[in-house]
Amino acid sequence: MQQKKVGILGGGQLGRMLISPAIDLDIELHFLENDSDAPCSTVSRNFHKGDITDYQDVLDFGRQMDIISIEIEKVSADALEQLEKEGKKVFPQPAIIRLVQDKRLQKQFYKENNIPTSDFVLIDNKEGLINYLSKNEDKFPIVQKLGKDGYDGKGVQILKSLEDAKQNGFDAPSVLEEKIDIKKEISVIVARNEKGEIAVFDAVEMVVNEKYNLLDYLLAPATLTKNEKEESIQLATKVITKLGQKEGINGMVGLLVVELFLDKKGHILVNEVAPRPHNSGHHTIEACTISQYAQHLRSIMNLPLGKTTLRSSAAILNLIGEENHTGTPFYEGLDKLLDLENVYPHIYGKKTTKPARKMGHITILGNDMDSLKEKIDKVKSSIRVIAK
């Protein structure tokens, strides 16, 4: 295999975790990132300072690469489309990135392709929001999501009444969604290369920190019936295959995370997607025969996809900054965790901690869910991310 220069837009923790599998395959990774202290800055010799949302910065960076990909969706899709026109390989394809950047377009895509999702209505501004809800007060409580720029739980809120909407509703293009009576939140990661090969990881169950609307911890595999497992795999496969077809693209290339709701009536609904490595796939580094990061690189380089066998039950615990702590991070209790068997800390190398900021994660392996949950409680009580 001839060495390729692969450019990644973004230099955060997801990019950082791409580096090890890239070394294994002798892939020359380059990162474009505006934050000089980003996680990739200290571990990559090919760190380029630049704005991933700026047309010219992305264009100049991409022209030096053989393949361009992303570790975050908020990038210049215009620049990526131009690079694609110039013959560069850009995965996921720019038209798909543009669709995923806007949750309103995502919801319309699901509807057009008969992909089950929650009922929704598109809202242009606060005036439209109040006008709609004043005529539909039976819809409360209802979920409002900003169309663009929502990330890590931000830009999502539950409106409980008309007065709540008047005071707190977003005054921007958004989508209103039916609030689902959720039994479980699950995630399925699927990869596809240019040859059309598809590989799917086992579904995982996500437990959300409701205060911050962030992943608290994850369990792999998700406890599902045989039919639920099959349906979740079929849905993820359908989504990655259908993405881009409206624009003349025969399916997405790259790694796709499909977040799903299992409701209390047994229905599985697509919530949203992310066309990149994801928090819900960190466990694959230790728990699977291939990691999501290695799989992403294989998919965008059109290499054979790896088998996704789960070798062990696993959990992921997010390490987030403690309340009332902002400054240089200190990982209190980390040394004690290193004494625990089958517990694997991953520190992201961020220079500053602040409340609810993702600072790392811990993967825990176990033989069964009961022992995993016991370990989660033990680990959670053993470590804090505080400021010095």
Image: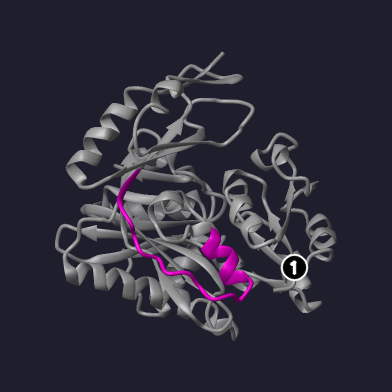
Label 1 crowd (10 A; few <14 / some 14-19 / many >=20):
few
Q: Amino acid at mark 1?
A: Gln
Magenta span contains residue 375: no
Q: Position of residue 38 (x, y in %)?
A: 68, 38
The residue labelled by disc 1 is: 3
Tell me if residue 349 comes above or below residue 19 in the rendering.
Answer: above
Q: How many marks?
A: 1
Tell me if residue 86 comes above or below residue 74 in the rendering.
Answer: below
Quadrant, the N terminus: bottom right
Horizontal side, residue 40 vs residue 340: left or right: right
Seen from the viewer's position, the closer of residues 286 and 155 is 286
Quadrant, the C terminus: top right
Horizontal side, residue 314 vs residue 257: left or right: left
Q: Position of residue 101 (x, y in %)?
A: 57, 60
Q: Is residue 219 visible?
A: no
Tell me if residue 174 comes above or below residue 225 in the rendering.
Answer: above
Q: Position of residue 230 (x, y in %)?
A: 25, 73
Q: Residue at x 24, y 53 (%)?
A: 184
Tell me if residue 103 comes above or below residue 251 in the rendering.
Answer: above
Horizontal side, residue 57 vs residue 232: left or right: right
Q: Quadrant of residue 79?
A: bottom right
Q: Residues in magenta?
A: 294-315
Q: Is residue 69 visible?
A: yes
Magenta span contains residue 309: yes
Q: Position of residue 375 (x, y in %)?
A: 27, 34
Horizontal side, residue 288 vs residue 245: left or right: left
Q: Residue at x 61, y 76 (%)?
A: 302
Q: Residue at x 18, y 72 (%)?
A: 227
Q: Secondary structure at mark 1?
A: loop
Residue ranking furthest to the top: 388
